[in-house]
Image (tube, rainbow, N blue to C red):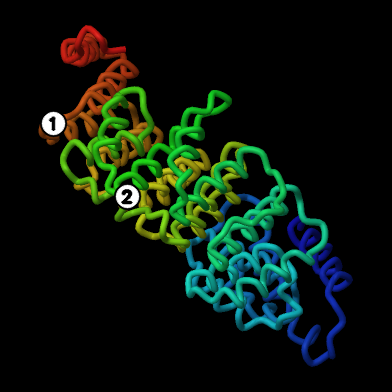
């Protein structure tokens, strides 16, 4: 009875908020089944059950041309399910005056950027800039995109631009990298050595830049200083690639000379900001847009996995983890670890430990990062003797100068 009352209230609200259209185009098709599916979709979306929400939205698509808030929610839900191309097609089929929301213009900009259609990119940016009530982060995204597009079109950095703190410094570093500017090396060095925050992720892009510009020895020197145990997953993988002679892997997945790759990384940064605020749906929205622009960089999907794991979407997390293959050893090990954590959540710690132990034994010459992780798993399972055995292996492998 309570649910029926809620739906009745929502229906009344919808009628009062819906713009006036001719009767044949509006209320005649608003039957109870369509509305029920629509509002069920809204409830599912609010409850972070996006797959279910999309099913409900798909069952009420008759509202697509009649109710602007439906279009906005439907697009958001499609992108969350990684159906970006479908979302783009729907936006293109919509009347121009109905695309009056930030995310709608954003995906059209990215689609045009991917096609190198800068005329349309500029058109949509202008439309986006006229939107009212943009929050601070959306304004920062808009201003940053305008700067990037200026660089891509004019091959020079915009002189008059807003200062967005560290975001501006990161953006200018990538812009100079794109242009092949002589100061790129200095900008990267200043960024990764900044004492005010952790910018170690950008070591990867610095390495890619060095390799792409035949400064391979410098890249090797930088990565040699990085320890498997106390560095990020991305840098650990980079170290593994360089040590095994697979240096081309870094430039295969990211190039400063590729505008799509650069904007993809910018979107990942925005996704990371939302994730740090525990806004996992918005984080995944930007992650999927990032992946749309640069699908080669599958390693960013580790953040999707973390978001899904924290949301207890274990089935989705397991599906996303399948993107990490054996030939990328560190990310494949990350996949095994996360699968073991999911087993612990869904079953028990004993099965979790047995799974990771079996997978660990299949690895030929595991590096210290992997040995350290298996030691931690034993320790967390209170198998202290086994943990000490692996910790000892690590200690014995270190020289006197090691941290």
Disc number placed over residue 361 in the picture, else none: 1
Q: Quadrant of residue 106?
A: bottom right
- Examine the rendering and report whether any part of residue 175 can be seen: yes
Mark 1 is surrounded, within 10 Å at the Cα level, by few (under 14), some (14 to 19) or many (20 or more) other residues, namely: few
Residue 312 picture location, percent across and down: 49, 42
Nearest the camera: 290 or 121? 121
From the viewer's perspective, is 69 left or right of 234?
right
In this rendering, the label closer to the viewer, 1 or 2: 2
Q: Quadrant of residue 154?
A: bottom right
* CB-based contact (under 8 Å), mark 1 and mark 2: no
Above or below, 174 against 291 in this view is above
Q: Name which residue lies at 35% across and 58% down.
A: 296
Q: Name which residue lies at 51% across and 35% down.
A: 191
Residue tagged 2? 213
Above or below, 139 against 302 in this view is below
Above or below, 290 against 330 in this view is below
From the viewer's perspective, is 264 left or right of 74?
left
Residue 299 picture location, percent across and down: 37, 47
Measure the C-alpha gap from mark 1 to mark 2. 39 Å
From the viewer's perspective, is 346 left or right of 32?
left
Above or below, 401 against 38 in this view is above
Nearest the camera: 187 or 80? 187
Q: Secondary structure at mark 2?
A: loop
- Examine the rendering and report whether any part of residue 44 can be seen: no
């Amino acid at each position: 009875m309570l649910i029926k009352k809620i739906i009745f209230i929502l229906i009344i609200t919808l009628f009062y908020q819906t713009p006036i259209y001719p009767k044949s185009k509006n209320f005649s098709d608003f039957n109870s089944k369509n509305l029920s599916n629509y509002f069920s979709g809204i409830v599912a979306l609010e409850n972070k059950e996006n797959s279910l929400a999309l099913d409900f939205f798909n069952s009420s698509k008759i509202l697509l041309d009649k109710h602007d808030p439906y279009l906005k929610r439907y697009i958001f839900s499609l992108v969350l399910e990684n159906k970006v191309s479908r979302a783009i097609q729907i936006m293109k089929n919509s009347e121009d005056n109905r695309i009056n929301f930030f995310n709608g213009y954003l995906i059209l900009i990215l689609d045009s950027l991917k096609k190198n259609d800068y005329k349309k990119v500029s058109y949509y940016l202008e439309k986006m800039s006229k939107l009212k009530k943009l929050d601070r982060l959306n304004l920062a995204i808009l201003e940053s995109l305008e700067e990037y597009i200026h660089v891509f079109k004019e091959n020079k950095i915009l002189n008059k631009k807003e200062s967005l703190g560290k975001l501006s410094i990161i953006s200018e570093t990538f812009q100079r990298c794109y242009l092949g500017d002589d100061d790129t090396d200095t900008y990267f060095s200043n960024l990764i050595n900044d004492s005010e925050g952790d910018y170690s992720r950008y070591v990867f892009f610095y390495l890619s830049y060095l390799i792409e510009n035949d400064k391979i020895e410098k890249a090797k020197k930088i990565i040699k200083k990085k320890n498997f145990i106390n560095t990020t997953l991305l840098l650990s993988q980079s170290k593994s690639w360089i040590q095994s002679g697979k240096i081309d892997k870094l430039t295969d997945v990211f190039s400063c000379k590729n505008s799509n790759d650069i904007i993809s990384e910018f979107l990942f940064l925005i996704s990371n900001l939302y994730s740090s605020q525990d806004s996992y749906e918005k984080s995944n929205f930007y992650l999927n847009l990032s992946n749309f622009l640069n699908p080669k960089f599958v390693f960013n999907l580790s953040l999707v996995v973390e978001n899904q794991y924290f949301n207890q979407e274990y089935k989705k997390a397991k599906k996303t983890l399948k993107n990490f293959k054996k030939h990328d050893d560190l990310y494949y090990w990350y996949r095994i670890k996360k699968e073991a954590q999911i087993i612990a959540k869904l079953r028990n710690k004993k099965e979790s430990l047995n799974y990771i132990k079996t997978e660990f034994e299949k690895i030929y010459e595991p590096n210290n990062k992997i040995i350290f992780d298996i030691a931690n798993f034993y320790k967390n399972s209170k198998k202290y003797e086994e943990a000490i055995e692996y910790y000892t292996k690590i200690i014995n492998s270190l020289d006197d100068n090691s941290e």
